Image (tube, grey):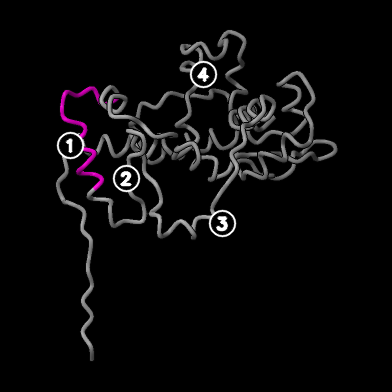
Amino acid sequence: MKKVNLKIIKFPKNISNLERQVEAILFAADEPLDESTIKDIVKTRSDISKVLKLLKKQYENRGVNLICISNKWSFRTALNLSKFMSVQINNKKKLSKAAIETLSIIVYHQPVTRSEIEEIRGVAFATATLEILLELNWVRPSGRKNVPGKPIQYSTTDDFLSHFNLTKLTDLPNIEELTSAGLIDGANVDSGIFGTGKFYKEQIDEKKENPYSNIDDMLSGTLKTNED
C-alpha cells in the first residue's frame, strides 16, 4: 500500500493577545483597514506592521488569506477558491423602520398578534413588513390566541437569537436598562405587558436551575397577563 504524506498546516499554539485582537478586528471589519486605524483601535504602541505580517504568513495557505491592497488590510477568499464563492453571494438589505418596530414589538411582547402589534405601534402596517421578518426566519407563527377570530400569534425564533448573538431572550436589556439608556420612556411603559410568554418561561427555568440567583424580575405580572 502506497504511503501518502499529508502536509498538515498548524496554527501556532501560542499567539500574542495583540495578534488575536488584530485578527478579530480584521474579521469583523466591513472594509479594509490601514495600519494606523488598526493601531488606534487596539490602542498600542507596538509594531502593528510586524503583527500583520505574522498573521499574513499564518493564513497564506488557508481558505482565506490576509492581504494588503493600497496599504489597507483585509481577509479575502483565496484566489484559487474564488470560483466556489459565486453561489454564496447575498444581497444585503436594510430593514425598514416599520420592520424594525414590528420586530421590536414581537421580541418584547411575544406571543403577539398582528392587531396587537398595530395597536402598540399606533398605525397599521403592510403585510410585506411581517413577511420580511418571516422570510428572514427571525419570527414565526406560534399558535392562535384564544379570542374570537382566533388570530395568529407571532414569536421570535432561534435564528433571531443566533443573528443577534443572544443565548436567550432574557439577555436582552430590560425596562430599567432601556430607560437609563434613553431608548424608552419608562414612565409610560406598563411592565405588566412588557414581555410575555417566552420571557416569563425563561425566568422560571432560570430560577429552577439556580434558586439563589438574584436575577431581577424583569417582567412582573406577566403570568397574570398571560392568563387574562
> Closer to the observer: label 4 or label 3?
3
Q: Quadrant of residue 33?
A: top left
* Upstream in sequence: badge 4 or badge 3: 3
* Upstream in sequence: badge 3 or badge 2: 2
Q: Residue at x 31, y 56 (%)?
A: 62
* Upstream in sequence: badge 2 or badge 4: 2
- Residue 80, position as x, y percentages in the image: 40, 60
Labelled disc at residue 66: 2
* Upstream in sequence: badge 4 or badge 1: 1
Callout 4 amino acid? Ile
Residue 57 vs residue 190: left or right?
left
In the depicted structure, whether residue 5 falls above or below residue 69: below
* Secondary structure category for the residue under label 2: strand
Callout 3 amino acid? Val
* Upstream in sequence: badge 3 or badge 1: 1
**Residue under pointer 3:** 87
Q: Residue at x 61, y 16 (%)?
A: 190
- Residue 52, position as x, y percentages in the image: 24, 38
**Residue under pointer 1:** 50
Depth order, front residue of 79/149? 79
* Secondary structure category for the residue under label 1: helix
Quadrant of image for the C terminus: top right
Callout 1 amino acid? Lys
Callout 2 amino acid? Leu
**Residue under pointer 4:** 175
In the depicted structure, whether residue 180 falls above or below residue 88: above
> Closer to the observer: label 4 or label 1?
1
Find the magenta span and give its range. 41-56
